[in-house]
Amino acid sequence: MNIENVYERKVEVAEKEIGDKLFYLLWSMTIVQLALIVWEWINLIHPLNSLLGLSDKIEIKAIELSTTGYLVIQLAYMGKKEITRWVKKADTVLNPNEYIRRIRRGDTAILLWGILYILGIVCVALHIIVHMPAELSRTFIQVTTLYTCAFVSKAAFKGRMKQDKQINHTGVPEGEQGITARAALESATNKEIALVEFIRDRKVVDIRDCIDHLALPKSTVNLMLKNMVDSGLLLREGSSRSVTYFVSKEAAQSLNNSDHAEK
């Protein structure tokens, strides 16, 4: 493993650790914020603060500070996710199982705040409490707004990636893509043709698969893959160590036609 790979690996590990810490900090703050608002709610029904000798001003100040801190942590966590998504062109740095688990936790947070907010409206309507807990509306609005923005961003990212997949990465006009792919295949070396056939059969590969298949140095394989992407034989997706390659539609058709012609 060369120095570049070691550096990339260290960066990935650091990014994941930062994401993990922000995620668990966010959930810790969610629990704290819920507890403070529920405490305020209880005080609207039974004045526990006066019974315990606590000042209402201290309680209000604590909830306000907690709401602000909660917002800062949410912005940090979601900002980190958006940077990973748009700058590094990766939807997530988590493995699929971890990603699904975190999506469910995110949905749970929205559900909790939604239920609490609706319950507050009902309690006010039934005159169980005189007014909505001071920071509940603010917290509900900020959580809903941030997650809505994240949802829109994610949908836009997926649409962009889908569009990128449909566009030939060489910038060749659509009507000429088949001609370009055929010309690239005709001028390709035996190793390049073998690699295209390998990737076609495997559907999607990464550079490690190509290195193992060709038994060539990484630098050589990297150059081959770059040239094949530039010529339109392959399409590339992802970034850094998460890059994958697959055969372009035009190259696959040309390759299949060649196979049939030989038979």
Image: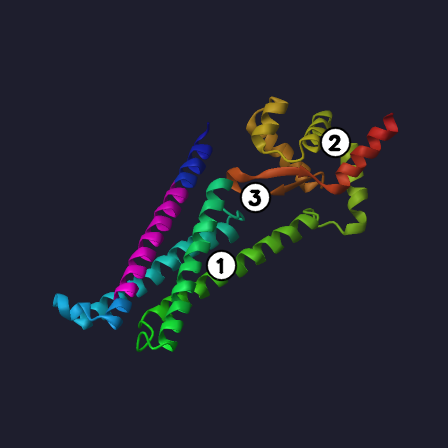
Which colouring convention does the figure follow? rainbow
Specify whether residue 136 is painted magenta. Answer: no
Q: Which mark is residue 188?
A: 2
Report the Cα–Cα distance between label 1 and label 2: 44 Å
Nearest the viewer among 52 and 164 is 52
Q: Please tell me which residue is depicted at 67% across the width and 47% down the height of the picture.
A: 169
Q: Position of residue 119 (x, y in %)?
A: 39, 68
Residue 11 makes an appearance in the image: yes
Question: For numbered disc 3, what is the local secondary structure?
Answer: loop
For residue 150, above or below residue 92: below
- Residue at image mark 3: 238
Q: Which residues are magenta?
A: 14-39
Q: Amino acid at mark 3?
A: Gly
Q: Position of residue 232 (x, y in %)?
A: 71, 41
Q: Which mark is residue 150?
A: 1
Nearest the viewer among 257 and 179 is 257
The mark nearer the N terminus, 1 or 3, is 1
Indicate left or right for 234 with 173 as reference: left
For residue 258, above or below residue 175: above
Report the Cα–Cα distance between label 3 and label 2: 25 Å
